Amino acid sequence: MGKVMPGRYSAEMDGSFVVFIIGMRINKLWAIHKWLPVFNAMGPMMSELYRNREHGFMDASYYISWRGVTIVQYWRSFEHLEQYARTDKLHLKAWQDFHKKVGVSDTVGVYHETYLVPEGQYECVYNNMPIYGLAKAGKHVPVTGRRETARKRLVKS
């Protein structure tokens, strides 16, 4: 996960950005033949995004629960995200395969949420953490001066 950075830090982003949350939920654990292909499809797409940052992808964090996986992604813009979703061959194939093999079956679910974050309309703090989350997608900065409180971090400079 990286070296722990002692102290208090925040993130700084240039301009607006997008937070995209995507995941899958295993509804029927014994239907491994339905949910395993969905699970396996995400790895190659994520590898491709990390290799091709020009798509607008900045970074991601992964969360595993006993029923599935959630990935929080950071994108430069909704246009970048939409362009990737509509034109990437790996993504389109995975989406088509899901509809063909799972369809409306209740064995596995997929979901996403998209949040458009205007410039300066976010705040975060990381205490004694590795460079993580938004700070990994943007700039990792010390919490000093105008960044001392959540309210101050939300005020544009």
Image (spheres, rainbow, N blue to C red):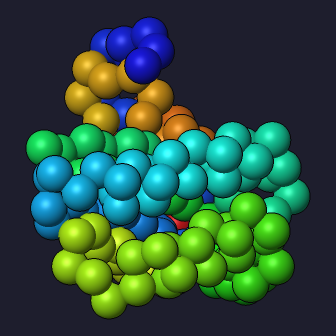
Q: What residue do we see at 30% from left, 36% from top?
A: 126
Residue 72: tell me if it is visible.
Answer: no
Left or right, 71 with reference to 25:
right
Picture quarter containing residue 103? Answer: bottom left
Question: In the image, is 60 to the left or to the right of 102?
Answer: right
Q: Is residue 93 left or right of residue 138?
A: right
Q: Position of residue 130 (x, y in %)?
A: 39, 22
- In this figure, what is the number of numbered marks? 0
- Quarter occupied by residue 108: bottom left
Q: Nearer the viewer, residue 107 or 89?
A: 107
Residue situated furthest bottom in the rendering? 104
Residue 3 shows in the view = yes
* Residue 115 image point, x, y percent: 43, 80
Q: Residue at x 25, y 42 (%)?
A: 64
Q: Position of residue 136 (x, y in %)?
A: 53, 39
Q: Residue at x 46, y 28 (%)?
A: 131
